[in-house]
Image: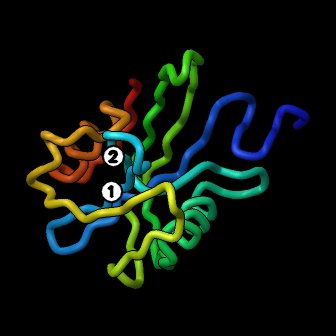
Amino acid sequence: MENIKKNKISGIEVIARGIILNDGKILLCKVKTKDNWFFPGGHLEAGETVREALKRELVEEINVEAVSAEFIGINENKFFFEGEEHQEINVMFKTEIKDCEVKCCEDHLEFSWFDLNNLEGMLILPEGLKRAVLDWIKDKKIFYCEQ
């Protein structure tokens, strides 16, 4: 248990992410200074379940309450950022929220709704997770994918 640190578990980042759909659109997030989008959510903190982390992050980032979070898949991703190798496990949930009028609460982030038909050409990272979610939207099968 000594290896557990806030936002990291044994050096591997565990991230809870939500697939939030509304009227043929999906909610995505990005860091304002970056070009890529990603699925909303955030890092698991010590003592939390992944569902708890997702619910907490949605309140912190867009001030909305998740009313449900149904597990839909896992993505393992390794990548380099600023010269360092990172490894993350993304735990994905189909998430229903109380209010679809989202307002970003963090200055460095932005959130937008996108038509599901336009996702293919967008830069959404991790790429393997994007492909798995696009497949899930069509077939609703629980997935596991590696990047």
Dots 2 and 1: beta carbons under 8 Å?
yes
Image point 55% across, 33% down: which residue?
A: 88
Quadrant assignment for the N terminus: top right
Image point 25% across, 62% down: which residue?
A: 26
Image point 45% across, 40% down: which residue?
A: 74
Looking at the rendered structure, the kind of residue marked 1 is: Leu
Quadrant assignment for the C terminus: top left
Q: Secondary structure at mark 2?
A: loop
The answer to whether 137 appears left or right of 105 in the picture is: left
Q: Is residue 90 above or below residue 140?
A: above
Q: Is residue 123 above or below residue 115?
A: above
Q: Label 2: which residue?
A: 37
Percent x, y for residue 72? 38, 52
Percent x, y for residue 114? 20, 60
Looking at the rendered structure, the kind of residue marked 2 is: Trp
Q: Secondary structure at mark 1?
A: strand
Percent x, y for residue 7? 70, 45
How packed mark 2 is, by other alpha carbons closer than 10 Å (few <14, some 14-19, many 20 or more), is many
Foreground: 90 or 84?
84
Q: Which mark is residue 96?
A: none
C-alpha separation, residue under disc 2 versus residue under disc 1: 6 Å
Q: Label 1: which residue?
A: 28
How packed mark 1 is, by other alpha carbons closer than 10 Å (few <14, some 14-19, many 20 or more), is many
Foreground: 43 or 82?
82
The answer to whether 53 appears left or right of 28 in the picture is: right
Q: Is residue 25 above or below residue 130?
A: below
Q: Earlier in the sequence, mark 2 or mark 1?
A: 1
